[in-house]
Amino acid sequence: MIYKKIFFPIGGGEELEERIYGALLVNKFFGSHLSVISCQLDPQEIYNVRMTLRGGISMSEFIDSAKEELITEQNETMEIFKKKCKELGVSFDENQHTPNSAFLRNLIGTRSDLVEKHSKYCDLIVAAVPPTGVITGTFEAAVMKSGKSAIIIPRTMTEFKIDKILVSLTGSISSSRALTNSIPLLKQAKEVHCITSKHYLQESMEETKGRIENYLDIHGIKPSFEVVNTEGKIPGQVLLDSANSFGANLIVAGIDADSGLKEIFLGGASKFFLRNTKIPIFV
């Protein structure tokens, strides 16, 4: 078992069932324990904001109504979660020592703050792509501030496997870290294909290729290698096109908390990739 504990924060937006299903697929693949949190704001905070903006409703009336909605939402999420666990044969179990298990906790507070705190105590993060490709507070807290490796999943995913892995290399610190952290996954893959662009080549293509092949050979990995042309292309499109052409099940890429998702795209920050990818990304 590579990962014993995986953390998945349920963010906002549509495709709730699909996102839960996708996270459970990843967990089932690794046979881990999936710790899931769903966060709602305190009704008192919502009331204070509403009164500031509009007013016109008593506190007790609003709090009672908000609590009912909160409980209804929590129950609906829990029902969906248990149903998806049952569909995939994942045990609904709070005991984190139970293999292939998952448990959902409902927490009250600011989602991004809670996610940042809880995400630091796991082996791997699973996070769904933001609804429009624009980075949200929850996504940033889980993926960029946890200090953990993460698998970013499409909002709808029907299977998870790692037979064919595409590795995006930029020569940066985060790219180097992602490559090393992904070694256990690369060793399980049937095919590994590494890509870079001319901008990130070292002294020559042969030297860059040689260094990559030499490093991965130590781990028994035999990758193919390609230099892709990024000139005049939409940032993110080159990576997506390369992954689709290769038939990748998983993409490995670096992510820099300071520059956002710039390094994933071999040449510029863009929401294009996140908005359009159907392939999970290991960062």
Image (cartoon, grey):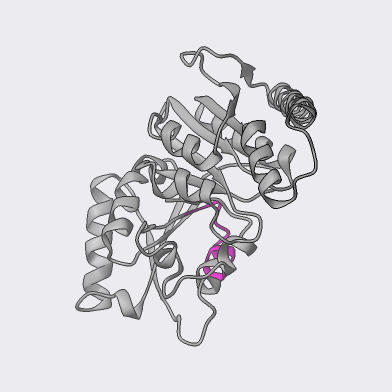
Q: Is residue 149 above or below residue 64?
A: below
| Rendered image quadrant of residue 55 | top right
Q: Where the N terminus falls, by quadrant? A: top left
Residue 77 left/right relative to 181: right
Residue 263 location (% of width, % of height): 39, 65
Q: Is residue 69 above or below residue 140?
A: above
Residue 219 location (% of width, % of height): 28, 44
Q: Residue at x 44, y 39 (%)?
A: 116
Between residue 125 and residue 227, name the one nearer to us.
Answer: 125
Q: Is residue 108 above or below residue 208?
A: above
| Rendered image quadrant of residue 67 | top right
Residue 114 falls inside the magenta stretch: no
The answer to whether residue 91 is visible is yes
Q: Residue furthest bottom?
A: 232
Q: Residue at x 53, y 27 (%)?
A: 34
Q: How many marks?
A: 0
Residue 94 left/right relative to 214: right
Q: Residue at x 64, y 64 (%)?
A: 276
Q: Residue at x 75, y 28 (%)?
A: 80
The answer to whether residue 163 is visible is no
Q: Is residue 4 above or below residue 171?
A: above
Residue 258 left/right relative to 202: right
Residue 16 location (% of width, % of height): 72, 40
Between residue 267 and residue 213, name the one nearer to us.
Answer: 267
Residue segment shown in magenta:
241-251
Residue 279 location (% of width, % of height): 59, 54
| Rendered image quadrant of residue 252 | bottom left
Between residue 260 and residue 232, name the one nearer to us.
Answer: 260
